Image (tube, rainbow, N blue to C red):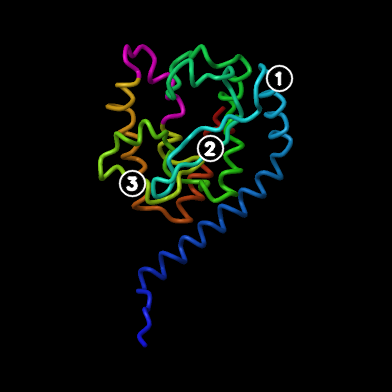
Amino acid sequence: MSQTVDSPDVIIESKAAWVKRTFDLVFAVIALLLLSPLFFLGSLLAKWQSKGPVFYKAKRVGKHETLFEMYKFRTMVVNADTLGGSLTTYRDTRITPIGRFLRWTKLDELPNLINVIKGEMSLIGPRPEAPDYVKHYTEIQKQVLQVKPGMTGPSQLANRDEEEKLRGQQDAEHYYITELMPKKLALDLHYVATQSIASDIGWLLKTFWVVIVRR
């Protein structure tokens, strides 16, 4: 009776995935514990801003095109999805004043740590995109779906001012799909091709610098 032996490449890939998952899980749990006061503050602000739930659960496409709900603190009015598209434009009227503060400080993204702990996201990875936009991906661009999306990463840091980039566009949706999204995906494809734990640590440090120090 013959046995199937995994190739060296498969073994290395499996080990790398295990190391990345361990790194994600340990860091996310520690971060959630250390940042629990900020998490509590974000919860209070999200609840205080207007009637509605604390969390916003955004439908996103994950690894191997699996759909999941990405947790964020709610920053918009209730039923904002019915009042406009999934794209947030410059000075979007659906965003509450407190919601703008949560977005500016990036506190709204802290609940992403829950997705990391659940194994739906990584700390570092391609930007998680909505199904309505993933359907426009080319076959090459779909290679970003071979890995888990990340809380932060090259495209997230490069496009922190996305709403500003959409400012003045008559058709923001078309501009996003034809101009911004391909540029983001190019950054994410490069990340997928070159990712390592060392580079992930580098992107975490860059995120800390951009979000905390430079602010």
Whole-number angstrom distance, CA of label 2 to CA of label 1: 21 Å
Q: Position of residue 90 (x, y in %)?
A: 44, 15
Please say if 14 is above or below 119: below
**Mark 2 vs mark 3, CA separation in Å:** 24 Å
Q: Which residues are magenta?
A: 159-172
Q: Looking at the image, is 93 positioned above or below residue 145? A: above
Q: Are marks 2 and 1 in contact (CB under 8 Å)?
A: no
Task: Using a 10 Å C-alpha cutoff, classify the residue at mark 2 as few (fewer than 14 neighbours), some (14 to 19) or many (20 or more).
Answer: many
Residue 48 is marked as 1
Q: Nearer the viewer, residue 171 or 180?
A: 171
Disc 1 + disc 3, Cβ < 8 Å: no
Q: Amino acid at mark 2?
A: Met
* Residue 88 placement: quadrant: top left
At 41% from the left and 50% from the top, the residue drawn is 147
* Point 30% across, 21% down: residue: 174
Residue 171 on the magenta segment:
yes
Q: Which mark is residue 190?
A: 3
